[in-house]
Amino acid sequence: MRVLILEDDPLIALDLQAIVEGEGHDVVDVCASLASARRRVGDEFDFALLDVDIADGKSYEIASALCDRAVPFAFVSASRPAELPQNLRHARFIPKPYEERAIVQSIEGLCRRG
């Protein structure tokens, strides 16, 4: 699996990358801003992990773009799922502080379906 990560906290980003790569998947990029994620959203990848609150805004537009492209993703956030816009409430939501198992299961679930 090729995974895009959108996370502006460098330590969390490194941890997510280590989890993903530790399971044998490739991280195509770790974006720390919405601007960098916008540039990558059209690229080829199989899954994305998105923090909701990024330094330059909310990741909702990135999530919507992924929905439009039928690219699965999970929010990994300290926000509450009820705060998501109605059109994104169907998305997988992993609360911070997250457990490694939750990250792995979100990707494995996609592998089993694919």
Image (cartoon, grey):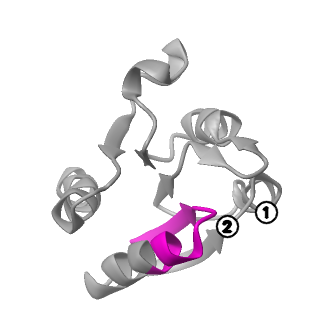
Where is residue 65? Give x, y as percent. 66, 38
Amino acid type of the residue tagged 2 in the rendering: Cys
* Residue that extends furthest to the top in the rendered view of this protein: 86
Q: Quadrant of residue 60?
A: top right
Residue 82 visible to an observer of this rendering: yes
Residue 31 as seen in the image, left or right of residue 16? right
Q: Nearer the viewer, residue 37 or 14?
A: 14
In the picture shown, does residue 57 fall above or below 96?
A: above
Amino acid type of the residue tagged 1 in the rendering: Ser
The residue lying at 72 percent from left, 58 percent from top is 37
The residue lying at 61 percent from left, 44 percent from top is 53
Residue 114 visible to an observer of this rendering: no
SS at mark 1?
helix
Q: How many marks?
A: 2
Q: Magenta part of the protein: which range?
A: 1-14
Q: Nearer the viewer, residue 110 or 15?
A: 15
Per the image, the residue denoted by label 2 is 31
Q: Quadrant of residue 8?
A: bottom right
Residue 17 as seen in the image, left or right of residue 52? left
In the picture shown, does residue 109 fall above or below 92?
A: below
The residue lying at 50 percent from left, 24 percent from top is 84
Q: Is there CB contact under 8 Å for labels 2 and 1?
A: yes
Q: CA distance from mark 2 to mark 1?
A: 6 Å
Where is residue 5? Give x, y as percent. 54, 65
Quarter of the image with the N terminus is: bottom left
In the picture shown, does residue 69 fall above or below 101?
A: above
Where is residue 101? Give x, y as percent. 16, 64
Where is residue 92? Give x, y as percent. 34, 38
| Label disc, if present, on residue 36 of the rendered structure | 1
The residue lying at 17 percent from left, 57 percent from top is 112
Quarter of the image with the C terminus is: bottom left
